[in-house]
Amino acid sequence: MRIAVTGASGFVGGAVAAALADDGHKVTGFGRRPDGWCNPRGRYLVWDIAAGSPDRGSSEGAVDAVVHCAALADDWAPRAEAMRANRDGTRHVVRSFPGARIVHISTSSVYDAFVPTIDAREDTPPARRYLSAYSETKALAERELAGTDAVILRPHAVYGPGDTTLLPRVLAGVRRGRLVLPEAAEVPHSLTHIDTLVHAVRRGLDPASPPGTYNVADAEPVLLSAVLREFLERRGVRATLTGIPYRAAYALAGALEAAAHVARTRPRLTRYAVSQLGMQRTLDLTRARERLGFDPAPTSLEGAEYW
């Protein structure tokens, strides 16, 4: 297949582009950075989907499918900036590749962050409130795909080799041998290894796979605290997980956000982060298993000492 991958200069897009090129597909990776994805089996082109014209991608030749990974995944991004990157960028991608199968990497953050996500199904009513512009604009991006031949994937907490956000933030949060987390992270989570997400992308690219929205994650939920302890141990970091009540953490984050708005800086903690770490976030994978033939492996930190 001739496949375009947006966001190929990032963690998820780079892993997807490399895997598909290794599979023998003709892959064109797109990204904003000149020094982005590099693979002997594919090519890389600079394209800022938020700023470029809607037909920028189509000028590079026809493709059979697009894996849309590009996004501004920042829970503190200004709303206007997130809107340009996530909603408008998705609109540009759809217009740039008419007739192509689109596999869109969305997020479980489109579910209501104010309450626990307990075995959420894809037909859960849309959230009416959001804790970040990231969540809101990713939900709006999904709407841009209405009526298209699109497979929308909603992973939660993508991790693995090349991760620059999730687990690195855990390491950065260790202070004096302690890692303080809402409820000590003693909550179930559906985590998504990058290989699991790549597997879902492959299934979504299959022309026989029906378009629609699908949750994707590792085979079974895990206790977040147990995974974090194992990760720290594998990285050789001696730290004790310490809990702070959810309400206290949420109030502290709110105060830090207010101060950051005044100082025009970035807060050390956000309410979005508290909601993700201190509440259950689990997904029902039935639809993906039955309709896509999705068969994920269990959560694994194998090799984490080298990530």
Image (cartoon, rainbow, N blue to C red):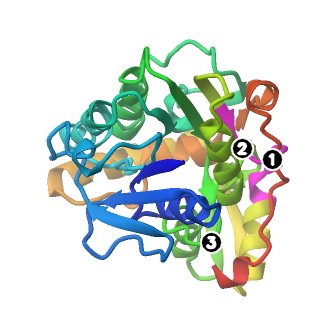
What is the three-letter code of the residue carrying label 3? Pro
Marking on residue 217: 2
Q: Which residues are magenta?
A: 215-226
Q: Disc 1 marks which residue?
A: 296
Residue pictured at 64% horizontal, 58% vertical: 194
Residue furthest to the bottom: 236
Q: Disc 3 marks which residue?
A: 161
> Tags 1 and 2 in contact by the CB under 8 Å rule?
yes
Marking on residue 140: none
Image coordinates for residue 131, horizontal then vertical, percent: 41, 34
- Of residues 9 and 101, which is closer to you in this image? 101
* Label 2: element kind: loop
Indicate whether 235 appears above or below 294: below
* Label 3: element kind: loop
Q: CA distance from mark 1 to mark 3?
A: 17 Å
The question of residue 276 being in magenta is answered with: no
- Of residues 190 and 180, which is closer to you in this image? 190
Residue pictured at 42% horizontal, 63% vertical: 10
What is the three-letter code of the residue carrying label 2? Ala
Where on the picture, by quarter, is residue 146?
Answer: top left
Q: Nearer the viewer, mark 1 or mark 2?
A: 1
Q: Quadrant of the C terminus?
A: bottom right
> Tags 3 and 2 in contact by the CB under 8 Å rule?
no
Residue pictured at 22% horizontal, 60% vertical: 265
Question: Position of 31 compared to 273: left or right?
Answer: left
Which badge, 1 or 2, comes first in the chain's sequence? 2
Image coordinates for residue 134, horizontal then vertical, percent: 37, 40
Q: CA distance from mark 3 to mark 2?
A: 16 Å
* Label 1: element kind: loop
- Of residues 37 and 161, which is closer to you in this image? 37
